[in-house]
Protein backbone atom coordinates (compact mmCIF):
# COMPACT_ATOMS: atom_id res chain seq x y z
CA UNK A 1 0.00 0.00 0.00
CA UNK A 2 1.40 3.42 -0.91
CA UNK A 3 2.16 5.74 1.99
CA UNK A 4 1.49 9.46 2.19
CA UNK A 5 2.72 11.87 4.82
CA UNK A 6 0.85 15.17 5.21
CA UNK A 7 2.69 18.00 6.96
CA UNK A 8 0.36 20.95 7.59
CA UNK A 9 -0.40 23.02 10.65
CA UNK A 10 -4.02 23.53 9.57
CA UNK A 11 -5.82 20.75 11.35
CA UNK A 12 -8.85 20.86 9.04
CA UNK A 13 -6.62 20.40 5.98
CA UNK A 14 -4.87 17.44 7.61
CA UNK A 15 -8.19 15.86 8.49
CA UNK A 16 -9.78 16.39 5.09
CA UNK A 17 -6.77 15.09 3.14
CA UNK A 18 -6.28 12.23 5.53
CA UNK A 19 -9.91 11.21 5.07
CA UNK A 20 -9.85 11.44 1.28
CA UNK A 21 -6.60 9.57 0.75
CA UNK A 22 -7.43 6.87 3.31
CA UNK A 23 -10.70 6.29 1.45
CA UNK A 24 -8.71 5.86 -1.72
CA UNK A 25 -6.59 3.17 -0.16
CA UNK A 26 -3.46 5.01 0.87
CA UNK A 27 -1.80 4.65 4.24
CA UNK A 28 -1.82 8.21 5.60
CA UNK A 29 0.05 9.83 8.48
CA UNK A 30 -0.03 13.50 9.47
CA UNK A 31 2.13 16.04 11.28
CA UNK A 32 1.39 19.60 12.36
CA UNK A 33 4.92 20.99 12.58
CA UNK A 34 8.13 20.72 10.60
CA UNK A 35 9.96 18.88 13.37
CA UNK A 36 7.14 16.45 13.85
CA UNK A 37 6.99 15.96 10.07
CA UNK A 38 10.68 15.11 9.84
CA UNK A 39 10.30 12.57 12.64
CA UNK A 40 7.27 10.99 11.05
CA UNK A 41 9.17 10.83 7.77
CA UNK A 42 11.92 8.75 9.34
CA UNK A 43 9.40 6.51 11.13
CA UNK A 44 7.07 5.83 8.22
CA UNK A 45 9.27 6.33 5.10
CA UNK A 46 6.35 7.53 2.96
CA UNK A 47 6.29 7.39 -0.84
CA UNK A 48 4.88 10.90 -1.15
CA UNK A 49 4.95 13.91 1.16
CA UNK A 50 2.40 16.71 0.97
CA UNK A 51 4.13 19.67 2.57
CA UNK A 52 2.75 23.07 3.54
CA UNK A 53 5.23 25.92 3.16
CA UNK A 54 4.20 28.01 6.14
CA UNK A 55 4.66 25.93 9.24
CA UNK A 56 4.84 27.23 12.83
CA UNK A 57 8.38 26.08 13.62
CA UNK A 58 10.56 25.56 10.55
CA UNK A 59 9.62 26.89 7.13
CA UNK A 60 8.63 24.42 4.43
CA UNK A 61 11.69 25.03 2.27
CA UNK A 62 13.99 24.00 5.10
CA UNK A 63 11.87 20.92 5.73
CA UNK A 64 12.12 20.08 2.04
CA UNK A 65 15.89 20.42 2.20
CA UNK A 66 16.10 18.12 5.22
CA UNK A 67 13.80 15.57 3.64
CA UNK A 68 15.92 15.53 0.55
CA UNK A 69 19.05 15.14 2.60
CA UNK A 70 17.48 12.01 4.03
CA UNK A 71 16.28 10.70 0.72
CA UNK A 72 17.39 12.51 -2.38
CA UNK A 73 14.56 11.09 -4.46
CA UNK A 74 11.74 11.80 -2.08
CA UNK A 75 8.61 13.03 -3.85
CA UNK A 76 7.35 16.16 -2.17
CA UNK A 77 4.29 18.07 -3.27
CA UNK A 78 4.37 21.54 -1.80
CA UNK A 79 1.19 23.42 -1.00
CA UNK A 80 0.79 27.02 0.01
CA UNK A 81 -1.48 30.02 -0.10
CA UNK A 82 1.17 32.20 -1.80
CA UNK A 83 1.10 31.29 -5.39
CA UNK A 84 3.41 33.94 -6.74
CA UNK A 85 5.93 33.18 -9.40
CA UNK A 86 9.00 33.32 -7.16
CA UNK A 87 7.71 30.86 -4.57
CA UNK A 88 6.64 28.48 -7.30
CA UNK A 89 9.96 28.68 -9.08
CA UNK A 90 11.85 28.32 -5.82
CA UNK A 91 9.84 25.30 -4.78
CA UNK A 92 10.55 23.53 -8.05
CA UNK A 93 14.20 24.55 -7.98
CA UNK A 94 14.60 23.17 -4.49
CA UNK A 95 13.57 19.79 -5.78
CA UNK A 96 9.85 19.69 -5.02
CA UNK A 97 8.02 17.23 -7.27
CA UNK A 98 5.07 19.55 -7.72
CA UNK A 99 3.66 22.75 -6.37
CA UNK A 100 -0.01 23.34 -5.71
CA UNK A 101 -1.68 26.45 -4.36
CA UNK A 102 -4.41 26.71 -1.74
CA UNK A 103 -7.38 26.57 -1.69
CA UNK A 104 -6.69 23.01 -2.69
CA UNK A 105 -8.29 21.53 -5.72
CA UNK A 106 -8.62 17.85 -4.83
CA UNK A 107 -8.45 16.64 -8.40
CA UNK A 108 -5.24 18.50 -8.98
CA UNK A 109 -3.77 17.12 -5.78
CA UNK A 110 -4.85 13.56 -6.59
CA UNK A 111 -3.27 13.75 -10.01
CA UNK A 112 -0.06 15.12 -8.52
CA UNK A 113 0.05 12.30 -5.95
CA UNK A 114 -0.53 9.69 -8.63
CA UNK A 115 2.22 11.10 -10.82
CA UNK A 116 4.62 11.28 -7.90
CA UNK A 117 3.90 7.66 -7.03
CA UNK A 118 4.38 6.55 -10.57
CA UNK A 119 7.71 8.33 -10.77
CA UNK A 120 8.89 6.85 -7.50
CA UNK A 121 7.78 3.34 -8.46
CA UNK A 122 9.60 3.58 -11.73
CA UNK A 123 12.76 4.75 -10.05
CA UNK A 124 12.54 1.92 -7.56
CA UNK A 125 12.12 -0.52 -10.38
CA UNK A 126 15.24 0.77 -12.04
CA UNK A 127 17.15 0.90 -8.74
CA UNK A 128 16.05 -2.54 -7.70
CA UNK A 129 16.72 -4.28 -10.94
CA UNK A 130 20.04 -2.62 -11.48
CA UNK A 131 19.85 -4.04 -14.95
CA UNK A 132 21.53 -1.12 -16.50
CA UNK A 133 25.03 -0.06 -15.66
CA UNK A 134 25.15 3.61 -14.63
CA UNK A 135 24.85 5.87 -17.64
CA UNK A 136 28.27 6.67 -18.95
CA UNK A 137 29.45 9.39 -21.21
CA UNK A 138 32.69 9.86 -23.05
CA UNK A 139 32.87 12.92 -25.26
CA UNK A 140 33.20 12.18 -28.94
CA UNK A 141 31.93 8.61 -28.84
CA UNK A 142 29.89 7.51 -31.81
CA UNK A 143 27.02 5.27 -30.81
CA UNK A 144 26.08 2.68 -33.39
CA UNK A 145 25.28 -1.01 -33.13
CA UNK A 146 24.14 -2.17 -36.52
CA UNK A 147 26.11 -3.46 -39.45
CA UNK A 148 26.13 -0.13 -41.29
CA UNK A 149 27.53 1.75 -38.33
CA UNK A 150 30.16 -0.86 -37.63
CA UNK A 151 31.21 -0.64 -41.28
CA UNK A 152 31.56 3.09 -40.75
CA UNK A 153 33.82 2.50 -37.75
CA UNK A 154 35.96 0.23 -39.90
CA UNK A 155 36.20 2.85 -42.63
CA UNK A 156 37.25 5.44 -40.06
CA UNK A 157 39.97 3.06 -38.92
CA UNK A 158 41.20 2.54 -42.44
CA UNK A 159 41.20 6.18 -43.52
CA UNK A 160 42.95 7.17 -40.33
CA UNK A 161 46.08 5.48 -41.63
CA UNK A 162 46.34 7.83 -44.59
CA UNK A 163 45.31 11.28 -45.59
CA UNK A 164 42.83 10.49 -48.33
CA UNK A 165 39.95 12.81 -48.90
CA UNK A 166 36.72 11.61 -47.32
CA UNK A 167 33.17 12.48 -48.25
CA UNK A 168 30.56 12.11 -45.52
CA UNK A 169 26.92 11.99 -46.58
CA UNK A 170 23.92 11.87 -44.33
CA UNK A 171 20.75 13.71 -43.48
CA UNK A 172 20.98 16.62 -41.15
CA UNK A 173 21.75 15.71 -37.57
CA UNK A 174 23.11 12.23 -38.36
CA UNK A 175 26.56 12.99 -36.97
CA UNK A 176 28.60 14.07 -39.97
CA UNK A 177 30.66 16.58 -38.06
CA UNK A 178 31.08 14.14 -35.19
CA UNK A 179 32.54 11.58 -37.60
CA UNK A 180 34.81 14.20 -39.17
CA UNK A 181 36.20 14.99 -35.72
CA UNK A 182 36.73 11.33 -34.90
CA UNK A 183 38.63 10.87 -38.16
CA UNK A 184 40.73 13.88 -37.26
CA UNK A 185 41.43 12.62 -33.74
CA UNK A 186 42.49 9.27 -35.06
CA UNK A 187 44.76 10.69 -37.73
CA UNK A 188 46.43 13.84 -36.49
CA UNK A 189 45.25 14.65 -32.96
CA UNK A 190 47.96 17.21 -32.32
CA UNK A 191 47.36 19.22 -35.46
CA UNK A 192 44.59 21.76 -36.03
CA UNK A 193 41.05 20.79 -37.02
CA UNK A 194 39.58 23.59 -39.10
CA UNK A 195 35.92 23.66 -40.11
CA UNK A 196 34.45 25.78 -42.88
CA UNK A 197 30.75 25.99 -43.60
CA UNK A 198 30.51 26.44 -47.36
CA UNK A 199 26.95 27.73 -47.23
CA UNK A 200 27.46 30.37 -44.58
CA UNK A 201 29.59 32.83 -46.53
CA UNK A 202 29.44 34.50 -49.92
CA UNK A 203 31.56 33.10 -52.68
CA UNK A 204 34.34 35.69 -52.76
CA UNK A 205 34.80 35.58 -49.03
CA UNK A 206 34.73 31.81 -49.00
CA UNK A 207 37.53 31.76 -51.51
CA UNK A 208 39.75 33.89 -49.33
CA UNK A 209 38.65 31.94 -46.25
CA UNK A 210 39.87 28.76 -47.88
CA UNK A 211 42.97 29.93 -49.67
CA UNK A 212 43.90 33.12 -47.84
CA UNK A 213 44.87 36.35 -49.55
CA UNK A 214 47.86 38.60 -50.05
CA UNK A 215 47.96 42.15 -48.78
CA UNK A 216 46.19 44.51 -51.17
CA UNK A 217 44.62 41.77 -53.26
CA UNK A 218 41.22 43.46 -52.88
CA UNK A 219 39.76 46.45 -51.06
CA UNK A 220 39.92 45.67 -47.41
CA UNK A 221 42.75 43.18 -47.67
CA UNK A 222 44.98 45.24 -45.43
CA UNK A 223 47.39 42.47 -44.65
CA UNK A 224 48.20 38.94 -45.71
CA UNK A 225 45.76 36.44 -44.34
CA UNK A 226 46.26 32.71 -44.22
CA UNK A 227 43.43 30.51 -45.43
CA UNK A 228 42.00 27.43 -43.77
CA UNK A 229 44.06 25.06 -45.90
CA UNK A 230 47.23 26.63 -44.54
CA UNK A 231 45.95 27.06 -40.99
CA UNK A 232 45.10 23.38 -40.79
CA UNK A 233 48.78 22.52 -41.38
CA UNK A 234 49.02 18.70 -41.14
CA UNK A 235 45.58 18.44 -39.59
CA UNK A 236 42.10 18.39 -41.11
CA UNK A 237 40.00 20.80 -43.12
CA UNK A 238 36.32 20.03 -42.74
CA UNK A 239 34.28 21.42 -45.64
CA UNK A 240 30.71 21.34 -44.38
CA UNK A 241 27.75 21.60 -46.77
CA UNK A 242 30.02 21.18 -49.77
CA UNK A 243 26.95 21.02 -52.04
CA UNK A 244 26.44 24.74 -51.52
CA UNK A 245 29.77 25.69 -53.03
CA UNK A 246 29.48 27.66 -56.28
CA UNK A 247 30.49 25.95 -59.51
CA UNK A 248 33.31 28.41 -59.90
CA UNK A 249 34.77 27.58 -56.52
CA UNK A 250 34.16 23.88 -57.12
CA UNK A 251 36.53 24.17 -60.07
CA UNK A 252 39.17 25.73 -57.86
CA UNK A 253 38.73 23.10 -55.18
CA UNK A 254 39.06 20.38 -57.79
CA UNK A 255 42.42 21.79 -58.82
CA UNK A 256 43.57 21.85 -55.24
CA UNK A 257 42.57 18.23 -54.79
CA UNK A 258 44.37 17.23 -57.96
CA UNK A 259 47.56 19.14 -57.35
CA UNK A 260 47.51 19.45 -53.59
CA UNK A 261 48.75 22.98 -54.11
CA UNK A 262 47.12 26.38 -54.47
CA UNK A 263 47.77 30.13 -54.58
CA UNK A 264 46.51 32.66 -52.10
CA UNK A 265 44.02 35.15 -53.57
CA UNK A 266 46.04 37.84 -55.31
CA UNK A 267 49.26 35.88 -54.89
CA UNK A 268 51.70 33.96 -57.09
CA UNK A 269 53.43 31.62 -54.66
CA UNK A 270 52.36 28.01 -54.72
CA UNK A 271 51.36 26.78 -51.29
CA UNK A 272 51.35 23.09 -50.49
CA UNK A 273 48.34 21.43 -48.92
CA UNK A 274 49.37 19.06 -46.15
CA UNK A 275 46.02 18.72 -44.46
CA UNK A 276 43.42 16.04 -44.98
CA UNK A 277 40.17 17.21 -46.50
CA UNK A 278 36.89 15.89 -45.20
CA UNK A 279 33.76 17.12 -46.98
CA UNK A 280 30.19 16.68 -45.81
CA UNK A 281 26.75 17.16 -47.26
CA UNK A 282 23.16 16.47 -46.31
CA UNK A 283 21.99 16.63 -49.91
CA UNK A 284 22.12 13.81 -52.39
CA UNK A 285 25.25 14.87 -54.30
CA UNK A 286 24.63 12.34 -57.03
CA UNK A 287 21.31 13.97 -57.91
CA UNK A 288 22.93 17.41 -57.82
CA UNK A 289 25.48 16.13 -60.32
CA UNK A 290 22.62 14.92 -62.52
CA UNK A 291 20.98 18.32 -62.28
CA UNK A 292 24.25 20.03 -63.22
CA UNK A 293 24.59 21.77 -59.88
CA UNK A 294 27.63 19.87 -58.79
CA UNK A 295 30.67 19.08 -60.91
CA UNK A 296 30.89 15.39 -61.65
CA UNK A 297 34.69 15.36 -61.72
CA UNK A 298 34.78 16.88 -58.24
CA UNK A 299 32.13 14.43 -57.08
CA UNK A 300 34.18 11.45 -58.18
CA UNK A 301 37.33 12.90 -56.68
CA UNK A 302 35.57 13.32 -53.34
CA UNK A 303 33.73 10.03 -53.54
CA UNK A 304 36.90 7.91 -53.42
CA UNK A 305 36.25 7.24 -49.79
CA UNK A 306 32.71 7.96 -48.80
CA UNK A 307 30.86 7.41 -45.58
CA UNK A 308 27.10 7.27 -45.85
CA UNK A 309 25.44 7.60 -42.49
CA UNK A 310 22.01 5.99 -42.42
CA UNK A 311 19.25 8.11 -40.91
CA UNK A 312 18.13 7.25 -37.41
CA UNK A 313 14.79 5.80 -38.55
CA UNK A 314 16.73 3.14 -40.44
CA UNK A 315 18.73 2.10 -37.41
CA UNK A 316 16.21 1.89 -34.66
CA UNK A 317 18.49 -0.44 -32.72
CA UNK A 318 20.55 2.65 -31.94
CA UNK A 319 17.73 4.62 -30.36
CA UNK A 320 17.92 3.05 -26.90
CA UNK A 321 21.71 3.23 -26.58
CA UNK A 322 21.64 6.78 -27.96
CA UNK A 323 19.06 7.79 -25.37
CA UNK A 324 21.31 6.42 -22.62
CA UNK A 325 24.34 8.11 -24.06
CA UNK A 326 22.67 11.46 -24.64
CA UNK A 327 21.06 11.43 -21.18
CA UNK A 328 24.46 10.89 -19.61
CA UNK A 329 25.82 13.76 -21.67
CA UNK A 330 22.95 16.08 -20.76
CA UNK A 331 23.09 15.05 -17.08
CA UNK A 332 26.67 16.22 -17.06
CA UNK A 333 25.89 19.49 -18.83
CA UNK A 334 22.85 20.37 -16.75
CA UNK A 335 23.93 18.74 -13.52
CA UNK A 336 20.97 16.33 -13.42
CA UNK A 337 20.58 12.67 -12.52
CA UNK A 338 18.07 11.37 -15.02
CA UNK A 339 18.14 7.58 -15.26
CA UNK A 340 16.18 6.88 -18.41
CA UNK A 341 12.87 7.14 -20.22
CA UNK A 342 9.74 5.16 -19.45
CA UNK A 343 8.76 2.18 -21.61
CA UNK A 344 5.88 3.98 -23.33
CA UNK A 345 8.13 6.91 -24.25
CA UNK A 346 10.63 4.46 -25.72
CA UNK A 347 7.84 2.90 -27.75
CA UNK A 348 6.93 6.30 -29.16
CA UNK A 349 10.58 6.94 -29.98
CA UNK A 350 10.80 3.68 -31.89
CA UNK A 351 7.76 4.53 -33.96
CA UNK A 352 8.78 8.06 -34.81
CA UNK A 353 10.62 8.93 -38.03
CA UNK A 354 13.18 11.42 -36.65
CA UNK A 355 13.57 13.78 -39.62
CA UNK A 356 16.14 15.75 -37.61
CA UNK A 357 17.91 12.54 -36.57
CA UNK A 358 20.20 12.44 -33.56
CA UNK A 359 20.24 16.19 -33.13
CA UNK A 360 16.44 16.15 -32.90
CA UNK A 361 16.58 13.36 -30.31
CA UNK A 362 19.17 15.27 -28.32
CA UNK A 363 17.17 18.50 -28.35
CA UNK A 364 14.01 16.68 -27.39
CA UNK A 365 15.72 15.07 -24.40
CA UNK A 366 17.17 18.40 -23.28
CA UNK A 367 13.77 20.07 -23.27
CA UNK A 368 12.20 17.13 -21.43
CA UNK A 369 14.92 17.07 -18.80
CA UNK A 370 14.47 20.75 -18.11
CA UNK A 371 10.82 20.23 -17.11
CA UNK A 372 11.04 16.67 -15.76
CA UNK A 373 10.23 16.13 -12.13
CA UNK A 374 11.22 12.51 -11.70
CA UNK A 375 14.38 10.65 -12.52
CA UNK A 376 12.68 8.76 -15.30
CA UNK A 377 11.36 10.82 -18.19
CA UNK A 378 7.70 10.05 -18.71
CA UNK A 379 5.15 10.93 -21.38
CA UNK A 380 4.12 14.10 -19.53
CA UNK A 381 7.63 15.43 -20.09
CA UNK A 382 7.19 15.11 -23.86
CA UNK A 383 3.74 16.62 -24.29
CA UNK A 384 4.42 18.59 -27.47
CA UNK A 385 6.28 15.72 -29.09
CA UNK A 386 3.52 13.24 -28.32
CA UNK A 387 0.83 15.62 -29.56
CA UNK A 388 2.91 16.14 -32.68
CA UNK A 389 3.10 12.46 -33.56
CA UNK A 390 -0.56 11.99 -32.88
CA UNK A 391 -1.51 14.82 -35.23
CA UNK A 392 0.81 13.60 -37.93
CA UNK A 393 -0.47 10.10 -38.26
CA UNK A 394 -2.00 9.63 -41.64
CA UNK A 395 -4.22 6.68 -42.11
CA UNK A 396 -4.00 4.75 -45.31
CA UNK A 397 -7.38 4.81 -46.96
CA UNK A 398 -9.15 1.51 -46.82
CA UNK A 399 -9.36 0.84 -50.55
CA UNK A 400 -5.55 0.91 -50.61
CA UNK A 401 -5.31 -1.85 -48.06
CA UNK A 402 -7.64 -4.58 -49.32
CA UNK A 403 -7.51 -6.77 -52.39
CA UNK A 404 -10.44 -7.03 -54.74
CA UNK A 405 -11.52 -10.18 -52.98
CA UNK A 406 -11.55 -8.28 -49.72
CA UNK A 407 -8.41 -9.73 -48.14
CA UNK A 408 -6.38 -7.27 -46.10
CA UNK A 409 -2.92 -6.61 -47.55
CA UNK A 410 0.34 -7.46 -45.81
CA UNK A 411 2.77 -4.68 -44.87
CA UNK A 412 5.06 -5.62 -47.73
CA UNK A 413 2.21 -5.46 -50.20
CA UNK A 414 1.23 -2.03 -48.95
CA UNK A 415 4.83 -0.86 -49.17
CA UNK A 416 5.31 -2.21 -52.65
CA UNK A 417 2.03 -0.74 -53.82
CA UNK A 418 2.89 2.63 -52.39
CA UNK A 419 6.34 2.74 -53.94
CA UNK A 420 4.87 1.86 -57.34
CA UNK A 421 2.22 4.52 -56.90
CA UNK A 422 4.75 7.24 -56.03
CA UNK A 423 6.96 6.29 -58.98
CA UNK A 424 3.99 6.38 -61.32
CA UNK A 425 2.62 9.68 -60.11
CA UNK A 426 5.96 11.47 -60.18
CA UNK A 427 7.17 10.72 -63.65
CA UNK A 428 9.13 13.96 -63.87
CA UNK A 429 11.02 13.41 -60.66
CA UNK A 430 14.57 12.16 -60.21
CA UNK A 431 15.50 9.20 -58.06
CA UNK A 432 16.77 11.53 -55.38
CA UNK A 433 13.49 13.41 -55.27
CA UNK A 434 11.51 10.21 -55.01
CA UNK A 435 13.71 9.12 -52.11
CA UNK A 436 12.86 12.41 -50.45
CA UNK A 437 9.12 11.85 -50.94
CA UNK A 438 9.36 8.35 -49.50
CA UNK A 439 11.58 9.54 -46.69
CA UNK A 440 14.24 6.93 -47.32
CA UNK A 441 17.88 7.11 -48.13
CA UNK A 442 19.05 6.04 -51.55
CA UNK A 443 20.55 2.65 -50.63
CA UNK A 444 17.31 1.74 -48.86
CA UNK A 445 15.33 2.75 -51.91
CA UNK A 446 17.55 0.61 -54.16
CA UNK A 447 17.14 -2.34 -51.81
CA UNK A 448 13.37 -2.01 -51.92
CA UNK A 449 13.33 -1.78 -55.72
CA UNK A 450 15.29 -4.98 -55.82
CA UNK A 451 13.13 -6.67 -53.22
CA UNK A 452 9.90 -5.93 -55.05
CA UNK A 453 11.49 -6.33 -58.49
CA UNK A 454 10.40 -2.89 -59.55
CA UNK A 455 12.29 -1.81 -62.63
CA UNK A 456 13.05 1.84 -62.46
CA UNK A 457 15.40 3.23 -65.06
CA UNK A 458 15.08 6.90 -64.33
CA UNK A 459 18.20 8.55 -62.92
N1 LIG B 1 26.15 8.16 -33.44
C1 LIG B 1 26.16 9.17 -32.54
N2 LIG B 1 26.46 8.93 -31.27
C2 LIG B 1 26.44 9.92 -30.37
N3 LIG B 1 26.11 11.19 -30.63
C3 LIG B 1 25.81 11.50 -31.89
C4 LIG B 1 25.80 10.50 -32.91
N4 LIG B 1 25.47 11.09 -34.07
C5 LIG B 1 25.25 12.38 -33.79
N5 LIG B 1 25.45 12.65 -32.49
C6 LIG B 1 25.26 13.95 -31.83
O1 LIG B 1 24.19 14.59 -32.47
C7 LIG B 1 24.44 15.96 -32.69
C8 LIG B 1 24.39 16.28 -34.17
O2 LIG B 1 25.52 15.73 -34.82
P1 LIG B 1 26.36 16.50 -35.92
O3 LIG B 1 26.42 17.96 -35.64
O4 LIG B 1 27.64 15.80 -36.10
O5 LIG B 1 25.39 16.24 -37.15
P2 LIG B 1 25.50 16.72 -38.67
O6 LIG B 1 25.27 15.53 -39.50
O7 LIG B 1 26.78 17.48 -38.86
O8 LIG B 1 24.24 17.66 -38.78
P3 LIG B 1 23.95 18.90 -39.82
O9 LIG B 1 23.78 18.31 -41.17
O10 LIG B 1 22.68 19.44 -39.30
O11 LIG B 1 25.11 19.81 -39.72
C9 LIG B 1 25.78 16.24 -32.05
O12 LIG B 1 25.58 16.69 -30.73
C10 LIG B 1 26.45 14.88 -32.06
O13 LIG B 1 27.41 14.79 -31.03
MG1 LIG C 1 27.00 19.53 -39.32
Image: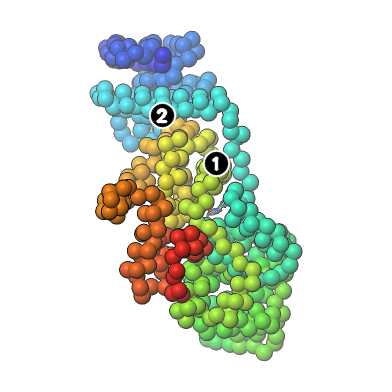
121 with respect to 85 (left or right): right
Is residue 326 visible in this depiction of the protein?
no
Return the disc, 1 or 2, that comes first in the chain's sequence.
2
Name the residue: 52% across, 42% down.
320
Q: Residues within 10 Å of mark 2 (few under 14, many from 20)?
A: many
- Percent of width and height locating residue 376: 47, 33
Residue at label 1? 324
Farthest residue toward the right? 161
In the image, residue 317 sits, relative to residue 82, either above or below, namely below
Between the C-alphas of marks 1 and 2, the distance is: 23 Å
- Percent of width and height locating residue 358: 50, 52
In the image, residue 202 sits, relative to residue 448, either above or below, namely below
Name the residue: 60% across, 72% down.
303
Residue at label 2? 97
Name the residue: 39% across, 37% down.
379
Residue 175: name its quadrant. Answer: bottom right
Residue 349: name its quadrant. Answer: top left
Q: Nearer the viewer's eye, disc 1 or disc 2?
A: 1
In the image, residue 225 sits, relative to residue 241, either above or below, namely below
Secondary structure, mark 1, is helix
Quadrant of the snapshot with the N terminus: top left
- Percent of width and height locating residue 157: 70, 59
Residue 326: name its quadrant. Answer: top right
Front in this rendered view, residue 359 or 161: 161
Amino acid sequence: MAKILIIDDDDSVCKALSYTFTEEGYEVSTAATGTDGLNRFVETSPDVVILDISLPDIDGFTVLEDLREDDENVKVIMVTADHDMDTTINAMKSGAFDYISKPLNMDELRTAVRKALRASQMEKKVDGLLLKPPLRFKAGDIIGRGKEMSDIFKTIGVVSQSKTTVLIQGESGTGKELIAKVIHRNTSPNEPYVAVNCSAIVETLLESELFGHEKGSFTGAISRKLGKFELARYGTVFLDEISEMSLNLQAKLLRVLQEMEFERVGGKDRVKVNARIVAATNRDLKSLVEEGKFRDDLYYRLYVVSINIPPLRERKEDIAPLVDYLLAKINLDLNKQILGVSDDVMEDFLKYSWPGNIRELENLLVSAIVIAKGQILVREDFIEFIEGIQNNKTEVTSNDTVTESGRLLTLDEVEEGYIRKVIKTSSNKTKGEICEILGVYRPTFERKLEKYRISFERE
